[in-house]
Image: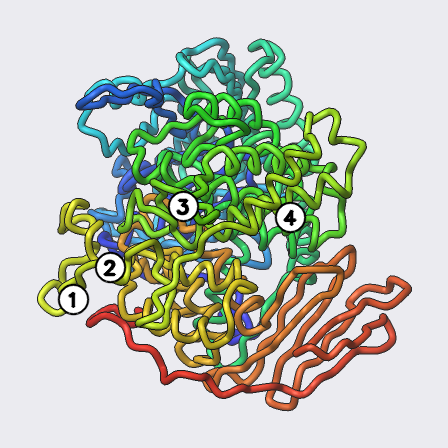
């Protein structure tokens, strides 16, 4: 592959910089949605946060409250590292390899987005002057969900040396970073597993453990296909928490030693330990039989198919091109093999946010997956609908009918200890309902196949229970927190009200389309009428003096934030008390602007432009979620260059560690949002109705945009240039696919593409400005 072509698919590290080590561990993480490993070096040290994670494997921990309160969660949940097999300890002539003591003369590490591997090559000189070379390659299989593997090789380049290699599989050895001063939390999470079974043989072994509190069983098995010069020796020792395989050999110049390390992880909340052991060993047997080359071939084949249906091309900006592909790769890694568990905000790339899933998974990740990998999206929706009974219980605690989904969770129970930013953010229920509707629109599948009808009904009931009708017949939602966490517990948050309206209408429509389920759900005709009446009467505040929508009742009358003197006090939440922040016109992340995208039908074009201009001047983007939203709305209004700048910020948030917190794991919602910014922003994609609707736009900084997606069983390719837009059907399916481009209805077949001229409308306002120092950061 030519170097320039490789650069478009390779994330490369050519030097080791300690200050970036944590973020690099996240960037070079590998996962498949079932198991994930941090991108640490092979050696035990240096590392910031080692770990192998499995989706749905967590432990309970205490929550402390300065003051008790009704309805507070009883305990927290945190993702925990399972048995980790990434560590390989190398000694040459009795001296351990430590890049801090012996800086490499050559270091090259590459995340290959087409091969799905991380390759490393390091050359260094030992204290005795021997030149050595280490090469390793890691893979977490996207095909065989329990399997990961490492190929590890050490070569003596110019002198005879003795080499000792210890390859570990260790449980209870990677405690999470605990950002909690309560010592009980660290105590619980330090050693979360109790040993159940262990055994070993000459080149490997198996460990079975169960968590103390959540009672989740995990088995990990390891084996090594060893390559040893004549005279070398291999042995394995084990105890309750570790399996250690050791290679000892002498190497002459030009000789090598190493192994292929096969790993298999399985988990279950129900199966006995012996069954878990046998499942892990069976998976390991399958991996050994497939072999290293077979695993790599399977990985490449799976990725070839993925990129054939998902690739994005952004001509003229190589850095952005690579960043968006990196983001797409992270979406694949987050969900390819997920089963019976949620996708956390960090996926399986780190322990940030304690591994919890939030509304932004349904808000951003799931819509992207529905357009790229609908089977993965369906599995995530089925997990969410499987937690409906727990959401009903939570609604009961809150004194409401219906179901109220948690702000943050792993198993479906609410675990947030700060209610103004969690329980008060009831928009999560409408966000989840929207995800089910989006999936149905994009795939053409029935809502009932993923449990969507039940979710829509129960979330509609919770909105109806919270609605307050005033003496003029207007419906209000009081005491809500919208997406902007710098404006908490307010009345009539516009985003929340509009999303609730959409939720109520969608539930009523779905019930009318599925009368056979109405009896089972005990939906009456009176209830359906109430939902529609409530939706029509929802109050949407408007400031007629300023000609904009306040994000909540009275927001435009709050005091202005002093952006000038506080321009270096970011993030604001770490430099000012919420009591002050809540009373000012300062926005953490897109809130009203998110409504301009998700609820666009509620605003005229002029209102959208004026609202965008107003909130651009007050939004500080202390959240990685914001830039992609602002990119979409800027593109739709016509501020294309600004939209491109926001797209760059969103896409590069982890590769440049723009938020300064990537060491805790990657920002999955920002990754999904970046792709959505391309497709829904510059592509203008909308999903309402049976037609694929596009309104393509092309900024000055790009000469061409091309993207692919799946629409109702078809693979669609869209190409946007100055000459116009071309839409192609990429599969051989018979029939026509209706596509509406800038309101012109076209048809696409396998034999005939559709084309339309590029429309570049003039924006109705001048380019918005941002608070001082908060312009797009990439």
**Residue 488 higher or lower than 568, as above or below:** above
Label 1 with label 2: CB-CB less than 8 Å: yes
**Residue shown at the point (49%, 82%) measured from the top left:** 699
The quarter in which the N terminus is drawn is bottom right
Quarter of the rendering containing residue 354: top left
The residue at which mark 2 appears reads as 586
At x 62% / y 35%, what residue is drawn?
Answer: 457
Residue toward you, 403 or 155: 403
Question: How far apart are labels 3 and 4 at the CA level?
Answer: 36 Å
Q: Which residue is mark 1?
A: 563
Earlier residue among tags 3 and 4: 3
Say which residue label 3 marks: 39
* Mark pair 2, 3: CA separation: 37 Å
Image side of residue 730 versus residue 103, left or right: right
Pointers 2 and 3 in contact (C-beta within 8 Å): no
Q: Name the secondary structure under disc 3.
A: loop
The quarter of the picture where residue 89 lies is: top left
Element type where label 4 sits in the image: helix
Mark 1 or mark 2, earlier in chain:
1
Residue 778: image x %, image y %? 34, 70
Q: Nearer the viewer, residue 529 or 673?
A: 529
Q: Secondary structure at mark 2?
A: loop
Q: Which callout, 4 or 1, points at the residue further toward the start of the chain?
A: 4
Q: Tell which circle, 4 or 2, labels the residue nearer the N-terminal end.
A: 4
Q: Tell me how far mark 4 sits from mark 1, CA to CA.
A: 39 Å
Say whether residue 203 is visible: no
């Amino acid at each position: 592959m030519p170097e320039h072509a490789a650069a478009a698919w390779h994330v490369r590290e050519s030097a080791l910089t300690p200050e970036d080590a944590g973020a690099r561990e996240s960037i070079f993480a590998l996962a498949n949605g079932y198991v994930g490993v941090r991108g640490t070096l092979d050696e035990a040290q240096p590392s910031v946060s080692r770990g192998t994670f499995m989706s749905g494997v967590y432990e309970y921990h205490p929550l402390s409250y300065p003051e008790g309160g009704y309805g507070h969660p009883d305990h927290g949940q945190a993702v925990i590292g399972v048995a980790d097999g990434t560590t390989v300890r190398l000694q040459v002539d009795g001296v351990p390899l430590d890049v801090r003591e012996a800086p490499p003369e050559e270091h090259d590490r590459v995340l290959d987005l087409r091969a799905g591997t991380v390759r490393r090559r390091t050359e260094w000189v030992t204290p005795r002057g021997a030149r050595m070379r280490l090469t390793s390659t890691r893979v977490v299989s996207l095909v065989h969900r329990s399997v990961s593997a490492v190929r590890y090789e050490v070569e003596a380049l110019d002198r005879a040396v003795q080499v000792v290699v210890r390859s570990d599989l260790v449980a209870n050895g990677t405690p999470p970073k605990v950002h909690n001063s309560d010592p009980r939390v660290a105590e619980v999470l330090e050693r979360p597993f109790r040993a159940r079974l262990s055994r070993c043989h000459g080149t490997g072994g198996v460990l079975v453990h169960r968590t103390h509190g959540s009672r989740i069983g995990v088995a990990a098995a390891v084996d090594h296909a060893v390559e040893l010069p004549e005279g070398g020796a291999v042995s394995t020792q084990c105890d309750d928490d570790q399996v250690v395989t050791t290679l000892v050999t002498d190497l002459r110049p030009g000789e090598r030693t190493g192994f292929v390390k096969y790993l298999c992880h399985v988990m279950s909340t129900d199966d006995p330990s012996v069954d878990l052991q046998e499942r892990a060993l069976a998976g390991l047997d399958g991996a050994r039989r497939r072999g290293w080359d077979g695993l790599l071939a399977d990985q490449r084949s799976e990725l070839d198919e993925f990129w054939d249906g998902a690739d994005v091309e952004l001509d003229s900006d190589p850095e952005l091109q690579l960043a968006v592909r990196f983001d797409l790769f992270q979406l694949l890694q987050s969900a390819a093999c997920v089963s019976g568990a949620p996708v956390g905000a960090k996926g399986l790339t780190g322990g940030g946010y304690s591994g919890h899933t939030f509304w932004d998974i349904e808000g951003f990740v799931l819509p992207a997956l529905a357009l790229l990998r609908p089977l993965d999206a369906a599995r995530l929706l089925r997990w969410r609908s499987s937690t409906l009974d727990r959401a009903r219980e939570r609604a009961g605690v809150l004194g409401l009918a219906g179901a109220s989904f948690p702000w943050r969770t792993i198993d479906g129970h609410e675990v947030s200890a700060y209610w103004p930013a969690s329980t008060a953010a009831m928009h999560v229920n409408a966000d989840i309902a929207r995800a089910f509707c989006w999936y149905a629109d994009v795939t053409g599948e029935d809502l009932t196949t993923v449990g969507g009808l039940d979710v829509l009904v129960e979330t509609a009931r919770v909105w109806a229970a919270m609605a307050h009708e005033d003496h003029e017949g207007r419906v209000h939602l009081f005491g809500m927190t919208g997406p902007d966490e710098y404006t908490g517990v307010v009345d009539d948050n516009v985003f929340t009200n509009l999303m609730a309206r959409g939720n109520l209408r969608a539930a009523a429509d779905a019930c009318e389309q599925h009368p056979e389920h109405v009896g089972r759900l005990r939906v009456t005709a009176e209830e359906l009428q109430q939902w529609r009446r409530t939706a029509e009467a929802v109050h949407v505040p408007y400031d007629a003096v300023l000609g904009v929508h306040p994000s909540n009742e009275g927001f435009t009358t709050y005091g202005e934030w002093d952006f000038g003197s506080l321009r270096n006090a970011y993030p604001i939440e770490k430099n000012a008390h919420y009591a002050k922040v809540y009373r000012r016109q300062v926005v953490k992340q897109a809130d009203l602007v998110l409504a301009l995208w998700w609820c666009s039908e509620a605003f005229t074009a002029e209102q959208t432009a004026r609202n965008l201009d107003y909130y651009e001047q007050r939004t500080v983007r202390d959240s990685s979620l914001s830039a992609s939203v602002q990119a979409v709305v800027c593109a739709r209004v016509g501020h294309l260059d600004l939209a491109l700048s926001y797209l760059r910020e969103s896409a590069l948030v982890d590769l440049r560690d723009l938020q300064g917190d990537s060491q805790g794991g990657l920002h999955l919602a920002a990754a999904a949002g970046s792709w959505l910014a391309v497709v829904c922003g510059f592509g203008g994609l909308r999903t309402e109705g049976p037609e694929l609707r596009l309104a393509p736009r092309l900024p000055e900084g790009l000469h061409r945009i091309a993207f692919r997606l799946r629409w109702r069983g078809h693979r669609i390719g869209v190409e946007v240039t100055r000459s116009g837009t071309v839409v192609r059907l990429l599969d051989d399916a018979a029939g026509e696919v209706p596509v509406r481009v800038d309101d012109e209805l076209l048809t696409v077949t396998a034999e005939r593409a559709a084309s339309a001229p590029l429309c570049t409308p003039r924006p109705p306002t001048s380019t918005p400005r941002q608070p001082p120092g908060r312009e797009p950061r990439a």
